């Protein structure tokens, strides 16, 4: 199977995994990216079996609506039963790097509000140590240069993602050349820089379960945290 087929397989597996959770009150959190897009397309087959969704980006909201799936503002719901989203990297503790699609802040908010976080990823995303994928940091535009200098002090190599504005009106710095031995500590340190909205490390709130697409089929990995 190629990477795209692996993404489809985990998206399909995620729909099967959440189906027993669906009833007329269920709110499903929906992530962003190509794997999440497959999940949205398969979730449409379950339309009517659940209340609706909260989306982690405008792009996902539009895709959900194009299928006729209700999308709620997060402030209009009491909670989210389950959140399904992709990742750019995952380690064995299911701590993640996310934000390749610039949706990290809303993704982190939806994850924080969800009872269960199901990560769906093809096997290329599995790493022992996070950091080969450049770590996205969402930054208030006027603070961009200051935040970049502070990131250099932490040992990173920030690169401005030009021509990208997040759904929140901010900019992205991608931090290269960091082997992230202590994800929790780095997540905190980056978030403590004034001007940072949040960063793409999901260590304080890792995934609860990972559906990993491999050549041998979809593997289920549970969080040990
Ligand atoms: C978007 C994300 C995505 O989950 C991540 O980039 C993975 O994307 P894809 O499923 O296209 O590989 O964090 O901000």
Image: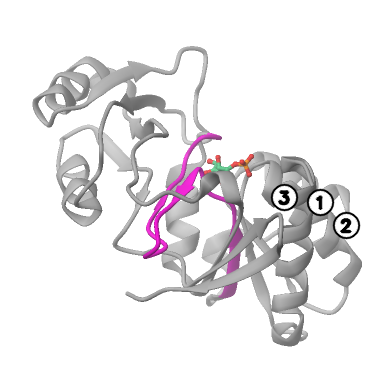
- Measuring 57% from the left and 44% from the top, which residue is drawn there? 124
Start-end of magenta stretch:
81-101
Do the CB atoms of the residues marked 1 and 2 lie less than 8 Å apart?
A: yes
Q: Quadrant of residue 22?
A: bottom right
- Label 2 sits on a secondary structure element that is loop
Q: Which residue is mark 3?
A: 7
From the viewer's perspective, tell me whether residue 210 is left or right of residue 225: right
Task: Give the mark nearest the N terminus, 2 or 3.
Answer: 3
- Label 1 sits on a secondary structure element that is helix
From the viewer's perspective, tell me whether residue 188 is left or right of residue 30: left
From the viewer's perspective, tell me whether residue 26 is left or right of residue 148: right
Q: Quadrant of residue 28?
A: bottom right
* As drawn, 172 above or below 204: above
* As drawn, 40 above or below 143: below
Task: Give the mark nearest the N terminus, 1 or 3.
Answer: 3
- Label 3 sits on a secondary structure element that is helix
Q: Which residue is mark 1?
A: 65
Q: Is mark 3 within 8 Å of ligand 1?
A: yes
- Ligand 1: give its quadrant: top right
């Amino acid at each position: 199977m190629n990477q795209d087929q692996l993404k489809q397989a985990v998206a399909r597996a995620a729909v099967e995994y959440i189906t027993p959770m669906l009833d007329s009150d269920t709110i499903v959190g929906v992530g962003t990216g190509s794997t999440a897009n497959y999940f949205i397309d398969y979730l449409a087959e379950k339309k009517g079996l659940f209340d609706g969704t909260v989306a982690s980006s405008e792009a996902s909201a539009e895709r959900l609506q194009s299928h006729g799936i209700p999308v709620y503002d997060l402030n209009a719901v009491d909670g989210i039963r389950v959140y399904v989203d992709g990742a750019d990297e995952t380690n064995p503790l299911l701590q993640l790097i996310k934000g390749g699609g610039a949706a990290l802040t809303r993704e982190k908010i939806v994850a924080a509000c969800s009872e269960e976080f199901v990560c769906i990823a093809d096997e290329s995303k599995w790493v022992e140590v996070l950091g080969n994928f450049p770590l996205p940091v969402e930054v208030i535009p006027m603070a961009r240069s200051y935040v970049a200098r502070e990131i250099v002090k932490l040992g990173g190599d920030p690169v401005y993602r030009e021509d990208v504005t997040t759904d929140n009106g901010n900019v992205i710095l991608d931090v290269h050349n960091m082997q992230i031995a202590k994800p929790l500590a780095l997540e905190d340190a980056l978030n403590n820089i004034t001007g940072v909205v949040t960063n793409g490390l999901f260590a304080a709130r890792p995934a609860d379960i990972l559906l990993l697409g491999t050549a041998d089929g979809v593997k289920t990995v549970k969080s040990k945290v």
